[in-house]
Image: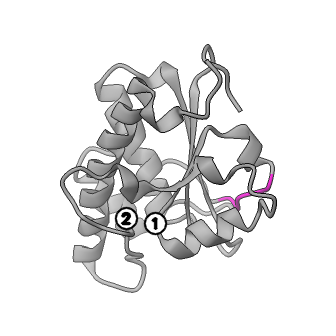
Amino acid sequence: MSTAADPIKLLFVCLGNICRSPAAEGVVLHQLAQRGLGGRFHVDSAGTGAWHVGNPADSRMAAAASLRGIELSSRARQIEPEDLEQFDLILTMDPGNLRDVRALDPRGRSHGRIRPITDFCRRHRARAVPDPYYGGAAGFEQVLDLLEDACTGLIDACLDGSALAHRPF
């Protein structure tokens, strides 16, 4: 976990780390670059499952993101228990991801840092970022709409400290 002088470390988590979490990583990196804040954050993504480890983002998600000027360059990896200690915030895409990530920490020491990304939405009311994998193009657009909203709120909450109440300053 970081100290106040270190970059804020964010980890986005979905099921397979090829659609939603790499999109969240790409969106937040894009927004940080636009705001000149890239050096203040370390951003990564992971999946709760290992099915796609080493693969790039789903081509449909990458194409939808590219149309918005967002690059998805990460490779899929599976979340590890050590991630719970290394990241300031672990942001999940749906209640199943939240449950699975919290299960990596049975004592609950990290539970305050494991949060749904939709907690940071400002314009959209959503409990989850839906998995677009088995749907059509509209699902990928919906995911990006939700993530753009949530990531804007997340960055602002990190900068004003409200998202990082647990972080030592």
Marks 2/1: CA distance? 6 Å
Stretch of the chain drawn in magenta: 77-81
Percent position of residue 109, x then y: 75, 50
Residue hosting label 1: 19
Quadrant where the C terminus lies? top right
Indicate whether 2 appears above or below 86. above
The disc, 2 or 1, on the residue closer to the chain's N-terminal end is: 1
- How packed mark 2 is, by other alpha carbons closer than 10 Å (few <14, some 14-19, many 20 or more), is many
Residue type at mark 2? Answer: Met
Callout 2: helix, strand or loop? helix
Name the residue located 31 percent from the left edge and 65 percent from the top edge. 143
Q: Return the residue found at the far bottom.
A: 134
Position of residue 33 in the picture relative to residue 45 (left or right): left
Residue hosting label 2: 61
- Rendering quarter of residue 153: top left
Percent position of residue 32, x then y: 37, 30
- How packed mark 1 is, by other alpha carbons closer than 10 Å (few <14, some 14-19, many 20 or more), is many
The reply to whether residue 16 is in sight is: no
Q: Is residue 9 one of those drawn in magenta?
A: no
Which one is in front, 167 or 39?
167
The reply to whether residue 103 is in sight is: yes
Name the residue located 39 percent from the left edge and 69 percent from the top edge. 128
Please report contact status of discs 2 and 1: CB closer than 8 Å, yes or no. yes
